[in-house]
Amino acid sequence: MTNAGENLLSAGVRDVNWLLDKFVADTDGVERAIGVSSDGLLIAISPPLSRAEAEKLAAMISGMTSLALSASRLLSKGPLRQVITEFGEGFLLVSAIRDGSCLGIVTYPNSDLGLVGYASAMLAQRVGALLTPDLITELKTSMIR
């Protein structure tokens, strides 16, 4: 059942949110995911993250992405594809989508990093195919509500 606010969202916004939710639900080892715009703002969120947690994570992902892009330029290694951070209890994968936007994927400790990395790259391609400057603006605006 959808609420009235969801009916006001465009098909593109609903598609991005659906892709993120489905990715978290269907990909073994994935705990949560968010979408972040090139300016570091939250554009999509999957349960069970709260809005406050997601905004903090978006800021961290934006900083990590900026550092990785700088390293890529300095080392002449081509475009950024993915940043992987390993913790004692899981991983944070940041996958470039397009035009500076990216996905942040949080995994459980026992996840298959190869599987999650491949699945997140496929998700980044699917979301990237949908993103336009207008859709990114609408996604940001939909997060304000």
Image (tube, grey):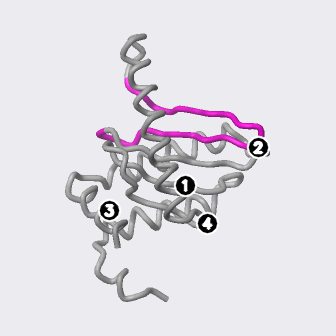
Mark 2, secondary structure of its residue: loop
Identify the amino acid type marked 4.
Pro
- Kindly report the distance in space between the C-alpha atoms of the residues bearing marks 4 and 2: 17 Å
Q: Are marks 1 and 4 in contact (CB under 8 Å)?
A: no
The residue drawn where x is 40% and y is 49% is 36
Mark 3 lies on residue: 139
Q: Amino acid at mark 3?
A: Leu
Amino acid on which the number 1 mark rests in the picture: Ala
Q: Residue pushed farthest left?
A: 134
Q: Is 14 covered by the magenta stretch? A: no
Q: 10 Å neighbourhood of mark 3: few (<14), some, or many (≥20)?
A: many
Locate residue 42: give its quadrant.
bottom left
Q: Mark 4 — residue?
A: 48
Q: Secondary structure at mark 1?
A: strand
Give the magenta-colored segment's residue range.
79-99
Above or below residue 19? Residue 125 is: above
Give the Cα separation between the discs numbered 3 and 2. Answer: 31 Å
Work out which quarter of the rendered image holds the C terminus and state it. Answer: bottom left
Q: Could you tell which of marks 3 and 1 lies nearer the N-terminus?
A: 1
Give the alpha-carbon distance from disc 1 to disc 4, as whole Å: 9 Å
User: How far apart are labels 4 and 3 at the CA level?
Assistant: 19 Å
Q: Which residue is mark 1?
A: 33
Q: Is residue 81 magenta?
A: yes
Which residue is at 28% across, 72% downward?
A: 10
Secondary structure type for disc 4: loop
Q: Earlier in the sequence, mark 4 or mark 2?
A: 4
Q: Position of residue 116 (x, y in %)?
A: 63, 44
* x then y, percent, for residue 94: 51, 40
Instruction: Give the dominant element type of the magenta stretch: helix, strand or loop.
Output: strand
Circle nearer the N terminus (1, 4):
1
Task: Name the residue tied to disc 2.
Answer: 89
Q: Which percent across, then down, holds residue 125?
A: 41, 46
